[in-house]
Image (cartoon, rainbow, N blue to C red):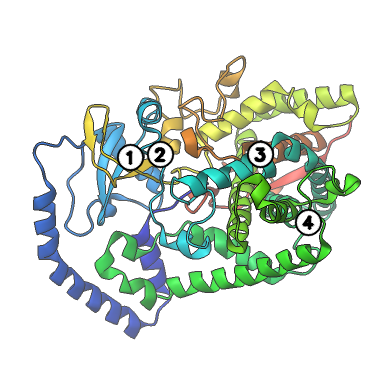
Amino acid sequence: MAFMFSPLFQYLHNLSSLSIPHYLLILTLTSLSLVFVFPHTITTRTRSSNPTLSLPPSPPALPLLGHLHRLSSLPHRSLKNLSSLYGPIMYLRLGSIPAVILSSAAAVEESIRFHDTALSSRPQVAAADILMYGSTDVAFSPYGEYWRQTRRICVSHLLSAKMVQLFGVIREQEVSELVGKICSVSSSSGDVGVNLSRMLYKLTNDIVCRAALGFKLSDDGSSKARSLLRDFIIYLGTTLVGEHMPCLGWLDWLTGIKKRIRKTAEGLDSFFESVIEEHVKAKRYGLEDGKYGDQMKERDLVDILLSIQENSDEIGVSLSRNNIKAILLDMFSAGTDTVSTIIEWTMAELIKNPQEMKRVQDEVRSVVNTAGKLTEELVEKMAYLNAAIKETFRLHPPVALLVPRESTKDINLMGYHIPSGTRFIINAWAIGRDENTWERADEFMPERFLGSDVDYNGQHFGLIPFGVGRRTCPGIGFAMATASFALASLLHQFDWDMPNVMKGKPLDMSELNGITIHKKLNLILEARPYSI
């Protein structure tokens, strides 16, 4: 799961939508706030500069802003540049928030091996509190008994290997539908090409909807729900100005960002409430998998969560209706945007590297043609395809800056003293491109993973797209089953190229910051059906 923390850019974006009189009023009030707060900021900074404490290296800071002015619209790149000057462990002040940035595998390894428990909590995030019922989901909830219980629910009941396998039918059906849609669009698109980015987002959204809710939003005309879920993904990655600069918190109300977040939360609450009520009426859920025989195959995540709620005494976990909604929202935030993004970046890298594209397609087609049909079991045997996915994770982790942690006690890390209450941000994007860990770090070289035991499950600190330690994402199996099977199908069924109108031009690999790091421009490709 990703996390965007560039409030100044969000603030400027909000300002740009206002009329000129409102814009001038806000600038005037902001200036007055700076005047009244400036002396307090200087005093606070002086008082906190304890010479007996050895904090990590830090760039010069400004009053009030701290180091916020050093962040560009792509914070993961700004932080990597700063780390090249100040080291793999760096102290920043993000407005009023003290933060430590980790930008190397060694720094992450030491923090997890010796301080994982002390660094397993989450800071309070206003948007997550509003959208996730007071952060009662798995990703944003603070470390404690509730988090342990909800994570156990995800690992043992919702996203277990058995459940991932049961949802294989859904993945196969939806990927087959995607292939058919590409065939239809490519035959009529001429030189325009296929907008693969949009199709991949719909694919992952449909799979998550069917697995979680039992139906696709596109099936029942729920365009409003689809829009709400898109807004949810955007707002979940938005840090409000007031979080970093409390004296300017009124800007979040004046610009309307808080109101829009609350409106989205209310709309989603109403939608999920109606879905849960329908499931209660259908009464398809039971504690034991075999209780309803073949109906087990029809159970979705709502059914399972209601089963846990109904049998809370036996299972030892108590869930409220709001807890169920928060956990379901986690499934959408982690299973839709991030999965479609990794497929998109992998296809983009393969288009940029034709020799790698040929090698992976030759492998996929050889395996499928021998077996006669593509299955998820076969995908696991495709060494070069899986190496290409790992290499894409290294270069383009969907979560460039992992969801921040917060220290719950003072720790000593790499010779530095870090006070309790410090925010920890792991720059997974920088770690994947660290030349001290990876040879030719900026090049797409899937072969580096052939015969290697390096994986993305959080055990190898140089490749951590799903997080690391206690906070590793519990949905790795579900996400990778979707991404790898979809990629194998696309590479088996079609020959891919740039559309005629774009041939001869380099593929634009610019990034767009958000809860996940997308390509800035949609990936539009020419798809020609493959025949033996």
Q: Residue at x 76, y 48 (%)?
A: 287
- First in sequence: mark 1 or mark 2? 1
Q: Find residue 384 and report its horizontal and vertical position in percent.
A: 67, 23
- First in sequence: mark 4 or mark 3? 3
Check if mark 1's residue and mark 2's residue have beta carbons within 8 Å.
Answer: yes
Q: Find residue 458 and report its horizontal and vertical position in percent.
A: 52, 30
| Label 1 SS | strand
Q: Quadrant of residue 419?
A: top left
Q: Which residue is mark 4?
A: 214
Disc number for residue 101: 1
| Label 3 SS | helix
Q: Which residue is mark 3?
A: 156
- First in sequence: mark 1 or mark 4? 1
Could you give the CA–CA distance between mark 1 and mark 3, rounded to whole angstroms? 33 Å
Could you give the CA–CA distance between mark 1 and mark 4, rounded to whole angstroms? 41 Å
Q: Neighbour class for label 4 at 10 Å: few (<14), some, many (≥20)?
A: some
